[in-house]
Image (cartoon, rainbow, N blue to C red):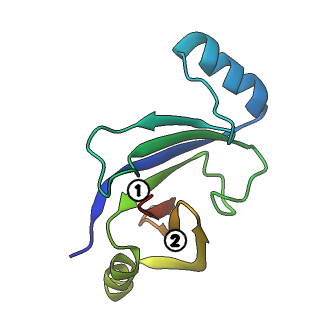
Amino acid sequence: MARVTGIGGVFLKAKDPKALYAWYAEHLGIKMSEWGGASFEWSDEVPAGTGTTAWSLFPESSKHFGDGPQQAMINYRVDNLDELIEQLTSAGVTIDPKREEASYGKFAWIVDPEGNRVELWQPLAD
């Protein structure tokens, strides 16, 4: 059975992402990486070389969280994205038909029973 293996990221909308990044850096020590967010490295990576949790701010106008008023979105790391999507489809879960593949993994989105958009990510081994 495919399953979630951890939190892949936490994403927040912000009226002024640059100013809010600066606040988090100053007050909580979260430093922005070159890619535009922060990475927290894991010590128990599966597969090896993929263990990070991202933290990122998106513009308030971003549609990445869907069309509703949702202000935050969790990205869950999964061990087998295709199998999990099949399981969720069989269970009647709302699945966004959009898929993405990048050099660091595969992505899909679902909607929970309260209408929250959830991101699923299967990291690729280095």
Q: Are dots 2 and 1 in contact, CB under 8 Å?
A: no
Q: Is mark 2 on a helix, strand or loop?
A: strand
Quadrant the C terminus occupies = bottom left
> Does 52 sit above or below residue 24?
below
User: Going by the image, does 73 lie left or right of 80?
Assistant: right
Residue topped by disc 1: 76
Q: Which of 104 and 91 is in front in this view?
A: 104
Residue depicted at x 39% and y 50%? 49
Q: Which of 43 and 77 is in front in this view?
A: 43
* Residue 39 percent coordinates (x, y): 51, 36
Mark 1 packing: few (<14 Cα in 10 Å), some, or many (20+)? many
User: Going by the image, does 54 lie left or right of 12?
Assistant: left
* Residue 109 percent coordinates (x, y): 52, 69
The number of numbered discs placed on residues in the rendered structure image is 2
Q: Report the amino acid beneath label 1.
A: Tyr
Residue depicted at x 32% and y 58%? 47
Question: Please, which residue is most extreme toward the front here?
Answer: 126
> Does 100 sit above or below residue 74?
below
The answer to which of marks 2 and 1 sits earlier in the sequence is 1
> Does 52 sit above or below residue 17?
below
Residue 66, located in which quarter of the rendered image?
bottom right
In three-dimensional space, the C-alpha distance between marks 2 and 1, rounded to whole angstroms, equals 10 Å
Mark 2 packing: few (<14 Cα in 10 Å), some, or many (20+)? many
Residue 98, located in which quarter of the rendered image?
bottom right
Q: Is mark 1 on a helix, strand or loop?
A: strand
Quadrant the N terminus occupies = bottom left
Question: Please, which residue is most extreme toward the left here?
Answer: 1
> Does 40 sit above or below residue 3?
above
Residue topped by disc 2: 108
Q: Report the amino acid beneath label 2.
A: Ala
Residue depicted at x 64% and y 29%? 32
* Residue 45 percent coordinates (x, y): 30, 48
